[in-house]
Image (tube, helix red, strand yellow):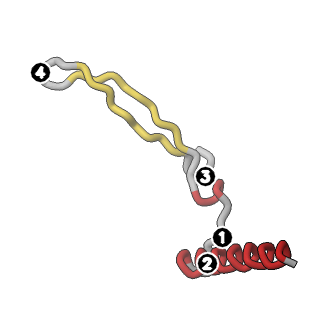
Amino acid sequence: MRSHIVLSALVLTLLLTAAANVVARGPGSQATAQQALPDCVVKMHRKYDYSGRLYIQKVRVCRTAGGA
């Protein structure tokens, strides 16, 4: 009987958490991770500033939806 109460409490907690997520994000926002995030890569380039010091420039390159 005690394990049944613990299991019921766990299920109730999961349901409330799921409901809170839907309310926080709004309806229809259950996109998968691939749909939500673009396919991006960070490229690093060596650059020199005006005084001649070397620094690393990070450039984020993402694929577009057209597949280009």
- The answer to whether the residues at label 1 and label 2 have Cβ atoms under 8 Å apart is yes
Label 2 sits on residue? 22
Indicate which label's residue lies in the foreground, 1 or 4.
1
Position of the C terminus by quadrant: top right
| SS assignment at label 1 | loop
> In this rendering, would 53 be left or right of 63?
left
**Disc 2/disc 4 C-alpha distance (Å):** 52 Å
40 to the left or right of 11: left
| Marking on residue 66 | 3
Image quadrant occupied by the N terminus: bottom right
Callout 3 amino acid: Gly
User: Which label lies toward us, 2 or 4?
Assistant: 2
Q: Is mark 2 in CB contact (under 8 Å) with mark 4?
A: no
Q: Are marks 2 and 3 in contact (CB under 8 Å)?
A: no
Residue 47 placement, left or right of 37 = left
Instruction: Give the alpha-carbon distance from disc 1 to disc 4, as whole Å.
Output: 50 Å
Q: Which of labels 1 and 2 is toward the front?
A: 2
The quadrant in which residue 18 appears is bottom right
Mark 2–mark 3 Cα distance, whole angstroms, equals: 30 Å
Tell me how far mark 3 sits from mark 4, CA to CA: 41 Å
Query: Alpha carbon of mark 1 to alpha carbon of mark 2: how far?
Result: 8 Å
Q: Amino acid at mark 4?
A: Ser
Would you place residue 6 above or below residue 57 in this image? below
Query: Residue beneath label 1, please?
Result: 30
Mark with earlier residue (1, 3): 1
* Label 3 packing within 10 angstroms: few (<14), some (14-19), many (20+): few
Mark 4 residue element? loop
Q: Crowdedness of circle 1 by 10 Å Cα count: few (<14), some, many (20+)?
A: few
Q: What residue is shown at x 16% (from left), y 18% (from top)?
A: 52
Residue matched to label 4: 51
